[in-house]
Image (cartoon, rainbow, N blue to C red):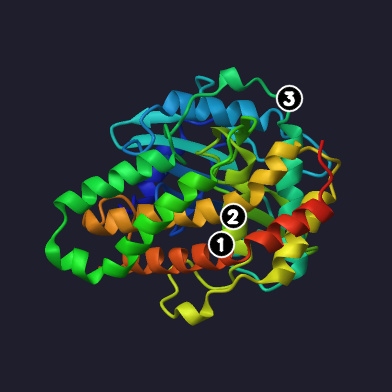
Amino acid sequence: MRIYSQNELTCILKHFNLEQQDYTFKALHIGYINDTYLVSLDGRSEYILQRINHGVFEDVDGLMGNIDNTLNHLISKEYCKVELIRTLSDKTYWSEESGYWRIMTYIKNSTTHNTTTSPEIAFEAGKIIATFHALLANIDKDQYVDTIPDFHSLDLREEQFKKALSTSSTEKQEIAKEAILFANEMLSQLKKMAPKVVPIRICHNDTKLNNILFSKETRRALCLIDLDTLMKGCFHYDFGDAIRTIVNTAPEDEKDLAKITFDKELFEAFIQGLAAKSPFLSSEELKALPYGAILMPFLHGIRALTDYLNNNTYYKVSYENQNLDRCLSLFDFTQKAMDELEYMKDLITAQIEPL
């Protein structure tokens, strides 16, 4: 991440519909893709400024159109709205030589959690994801572009993995041999398990726990953030991404696999949060949820493994083998979720009423 100067960032803000004040900026080292800054005034956090990674998100117009359209539908007393600050020419982003920039309002007194041991947090996460989907249930899907085509395609991730295997060093393949073996075995199993027909929705597509804002005061879930992956998808994608980061109480790149958990108390609390909303999922979607809880950690794991084999060209890493550690952690959770397949099926059937 390049750190931009106070003067450079101040100049960027001048292109947006904001009062010209003496703002201060703090680089936030969150996420793997965009460059993010907290914008403050007189010590109060006011905005989030981001440089969009154009290498990952090639269609910035489509990306910002997806976000703008979605924010206009996320209006409810149960959902805290984030707003885009438009440019002086009424666009949702500003582009210049340094890149593509956007500004969003900062939700005051909010916080995020990378992991949790709290059933209350798990319940609130389930409830806000259900609220998000209920608000978008009737949205016009044809207005959306795929910001990352085939983002959750098992076939694409297999193709990329096999290509990385064919070009990676013998040394890396030897170090990652257990992960490579697991990937090949799980690819075969997941293809057999894949649901035949599941409704298409507008999904968040990256509902890990730290993409949910919570109130510092009440611990209530407020809204979902990091909306770059808003596009068509299946609900079991959002379900599985939430499960992999809520039910597992260890960090994503935990090296001690004995600490990787499938916490049933947290799983049950999350399911209760989903069920707290009026029915919004079809019977086909409910049947696919356990598959999603296995698919999503595996997809993230095989992407990390592929990036490791490709010498860390996609994800930001702080040390050489971090992608391999991510992969092994995610694969371990994948197996633990697979071991709980029947439990998940029974609980979901008992707790969640279909639409």
Quadrant where the image shows the C terminus: top right
Image check: 326 left or right of 163? right
> CA–CA distance between discs 2 and 3?
25 Å
Q: Is residue 106 visible to us here?
A: no
The dot on residue 338 is 1
Residue occupying image coordinates x 46% and y 77%: 257
Q: Residue at x 42, y 31 (%)?
A: 149
The circle on residue 138 is 3
Crowding at mark 2 (Cα within 10 Å: few <14, some 14-19, many 20+): many
Quarter of the picture containing the N terminus is bottom left
Q: Secondary structure at mark 1?
A: helix
Distance, label 1 to label 2, CA atoms, is 8 Å
| Residue 97 x, y percent position in the rendering | 28, 32
- Residue bearing mark 2: 293
Tag 2: residue type?
Ala
Camera-nearest label, 1 or 3: 1
SS under mark 2? helix
Identity, as a three-letter code, of the amino acid under mark 3: Asn
Query: Residue, x 54% and y 21% (percent of image)?
Result: 90
Q: Nearer the viewer, mark 2 or mark 3?
A: 2
